[in-house]
Image: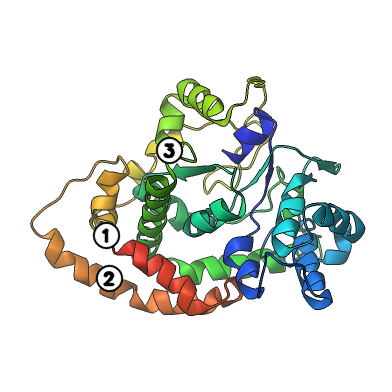
Amino acid sequence: MQGILRNQGGLAIAPETHYFDDLRTKIADPTSKLSEADRKRVEDYFLALSDRNYGYGGDPEHSKVGRDLLRARAEECGGTADAYFEAHCRLDFLDGTVTYASNWGEKTPRHAFRILEMAETFPESRFICMLRDPRGVVCSYANWKKKTDDTDPSAKASADDADEILDRERERIKKSYHPVVATLIWKAATNAALQAQRELGEDRVRIVQYEQLCVSSDETLHDLWAWLGIDEIDEGAGIPMTNSSFGDSTRKGGISQEAMVRWKTLLPKTLQKQVARVAGKTLVHSGYEQKTSLLDAVRRPFDYLSAIPTVYTAIIANKSRYGNPVVYLWRRVRMMMFG
């Protein structure tokens, strides 16, 4: 979807910033003018992101944007931490040159838990929430092998430290993975998106199934462009495939229908049933098929128990990625309770 919005719709869609769930939680008042210390901290955060993707140890001094330009654009937006977020997203640097976009967005999956805050901060914003069958999510997660992404210049690392960075990221993912944990995160994020749509309305929150996009891409995209109010569409532009667990990233990989059903053959039947069991009613509420049995209620507590060690290791492995751990966990646990 990021590639479609960029290539066909002409929007500047920044790679993952994690801002609302990470840096913003560490700033006392992200809506007020920053102290010198906080300004340096915020600038370094975003300048590092224009060097390398989030979590890859970007160097602010190697930024593709530059401190003076980022600061000038942020001052135009108000000089707050939120203004720096907007300026970073508008300063589109992914095609090798730096431009300042009028239509812009950002892609961070975990921002699903921050939609209401983002909606308040940017009153005219809209939100596209991509859903995928959780069995497909778990299958992809289980086979995930992080690679440098040639479709995204900000992801590249120098030859000196590329292997070290990727090894560290693979280790973090390994410590975070368990089919039940992955399913519970899917459940929480999906419930958060559904709740946001109920509270903000369908005019501001659009939920798109990945499978729907695969099966009827023309119709789905036509409706999406109308919803966004975008008239000039470059339908001939390539749609990149990025960060796939099964294929190499390409600038014109397109929409893969194979990815939609791959889990049906690659994910063991026992895991398919476990994922559906843990996803619960959220699976149905989000439009996916679920077959239930009388034994599900008996098996579900054992599913949860099996994931406890991974929950602990995941919290430790990801501690640098969030602010207050209690707030971070509560937002997710609260959404897991629905369905």
Q: Which residue is mark 1?
A: 278
Q: Amino acid at mark 1?
A: Val
Q: Around disc 2, counting alpha carbons within 10 Å, would you say few (fewer than 14), some (14 to 19), or many (20 or more)?
A: few
Which quadrant does the C terminus fall into? bottom left
Locate residue 203, reporting x and y percent: 47, 36
Residue farthest left in this picture? 294
Find out whether the residues at labels 1 and 2 contact each other: C-beta distance under 8 Å: yes
* Snapshot quadrant of residue 304: bottom left
Residue, x 52% and y 49% (percent of image)?
245
Quarter of the image for residue 147 reads: bottom right
Residue visible at 35% across and 67% down in the picture = 334
Instruction: Give the residue number, with chain letter if any, for mark 3.
Output: 202
Tell me: 188 left or right of 84. Answer: left
Residue 253, x across and y down, in percent = 60, 33
Q: Is residue 217 visible?
A: yes
**First in sequence: mark 3 vs mark 2:** 3
Q: Nearer the viewer, residue 158 or 124?
A: 124
Q: Residue at x 40, y 61 (%)?
A: 185
- Classify 111 as above or below 311: above
| Mark whose residue sits in front, 3 or 2 | 3
Looking at the picture, tell me which residue is in the foreground, 279 or 120: 120
Mark 3 / mark 1, whichever is N-terminal: 3
Q: Which residue is mark 2?
A: 304
Which element type, helix, strand or loop, lies under badge 2? helix
Gap between marks 3 and 1, in whole Å?
Answer: 27 Å
Residue drawn at the location 65% of the way across and 22% of the way down:
233
